[in-house]
């Protein structure tokens, strides 16, 4: 197979899946790992993709899939991250929690803790924590605001205005990406505005990001690296060079 054909097929595969493992490329092209390595290096030099642990990801700026889709992706890793985050909390604290697949799983883990005040724009988080049959009751405050198609969260000027009325002990946020250079970022301006307001009004800022998000910068930065206190990722993140850069840039880094 000609090199030009291989490069085209790798790009086509990546445009469909957005993240592809080295093994997937080997099987898709029917070539050796060494050939794949050379092709990937060439495409990375062209800016067409970025290498990550075990494979490649697209560098194209794309909107996140709907939450209903994200909830089914890397669920084990996200649950591990959620469990690690809970270990950092204490009863009686006030928390900001934004909307995302990882924070939705975090809500499940918070059911085992007593007496939290949770301020969130996520309908999933609010429903899980207020509707559960448990004696460990939390005070749940669902932020007002507008909702768009396929969204399961409030956002907009009203949401941000309400956040600014509160002061939280901890903000737990799930970005599209986090990097040592740029900090935490989101694709949507309205989601970034909500997360940014939570960052500004919390004493401690914790970023929950599975390893596919490490080293990724999306369209809107809402928490520069100096504003991040901790980053939690899954075990696969430990081998990433970007993870070490994050560690060296200031935030406490935790492997779930």
Image (cartoon, grey):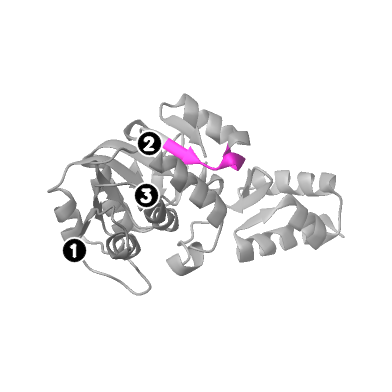
The answer to whether residue 97 is above or below residue 236 is below
What segment is highlighted magenta in the picture? 231-237
Task: Where is residue 218? Give x, y as percent.
Answer: 44, 50
How many circles with numbers are drawn on the protein? 3
Along the line of sight, the residue nearer the viewer: 201 or 179: 201
Q: Are marks 2 and 1 in contact (CB under 8 Å)?
A: no
| SS class, disc 2 | loop
Residue pictured at 76% horizontal, 56% vertical: 25
Q: In this figure, which residue is indicated by the disc labeled 3?
A: 112
Q: In this figure, which residue is indicated by the disc labeled 2?
A: 88
Residue pictured at 35% horizontal, 58% vertical: 99
- The alpha-carbon separation of the residues under discs 2 and 3 comes to 13 Å
| SS class, disc 3 | loop
Q: Decide if residue 48 is in sight here.
A: no
Task: Where is residue 39? Give x, y as percent.
Answer: 76, 49
Q: Earlier in the sequence, mark 2 or mark 3?
A: 2
Pair 1/3: label in front: 3
Asked whether residue 235 is drawn in magenta, I would say yes
Which of the labelled discs sits on residue 179, or is there none? none
Q: In this figure, which residue is indicated by the disc labeled 1?
A: 144
Along the line of sight, the residue nearer the viewer: 178 or 43: 178
- The alpha-carbon separation of the residues under discs 1 and 3 comes to 26 Å
- The alpha-carbon separation of the residues under discs 2 and 1 comes to 28 Å
Task: Where is residue 171? Give x, y as percent.
Answer: 30, 43
Local crowd size for mark 2, using a 10 Å CA cut-off: few (<14), some (14–19), many (≥20): few
Local crowd size for mark 3, using a 10 Å CA cut-off: few (<14), some (14–19), many (≥20): few
Asked whether residue 256 is drawn in magenta, I would say no
| SS class, disc 1 | loop
Q: Earlier in the sequence, mark 1 or mark 3?
A: 3
């Amino acid at each position: 197979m000609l090199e030009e054909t291989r490069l085209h097929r790798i790009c086509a595969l990546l445009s469909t899946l957005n993240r592809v493992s080295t093994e997937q490329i080997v099987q898709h092209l029917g070539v050796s790992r060494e050939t794949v390595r050379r092709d990937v290096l060439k495409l990375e030099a062209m800016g067409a993709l970025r290498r990550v642990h075990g494979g490649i990801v697209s560098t194209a700026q794309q909107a996140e899939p709907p939450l209903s889709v994200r909830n089914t992706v890397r669920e084990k890793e996200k649950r591990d991250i959620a469990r690690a985050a809970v270990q950092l909390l204490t009863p009686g604290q006030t928390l900001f929690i934004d909307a995302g697949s990882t924070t939705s799983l975090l809500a499940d883990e918070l059911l085992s803790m007593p007496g939290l005040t949770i301020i969130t724009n996520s309908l999933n988080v609010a429903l899980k924590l207020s509707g559960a049959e448990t004696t460990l009751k939390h005070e749940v405050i669902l932020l007002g605001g507008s909702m768009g198609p396929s969204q399961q969260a409030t956002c907009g000027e009203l949401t941000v205005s309400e956040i600014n009325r509160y002061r939280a002990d901890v903000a737990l946020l799930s970005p599209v990406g986090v990097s040592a250079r740029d900090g935490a970022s989101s694709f949507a301006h309205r989601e970034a505005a909500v997360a940014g307001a939570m960052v500004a009004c919390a004493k401690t800022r914790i970023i929950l990001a599975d390893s596919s998000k490490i080293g990724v910068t999306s369209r809107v930065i809402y928490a520069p690296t100096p504003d991040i206190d901790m980053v939690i990722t899954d075990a696969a993140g430990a081998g990433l060079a970007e993870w070490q850069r994050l560690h060296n840039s200031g935030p406490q880094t935790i492997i779930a």
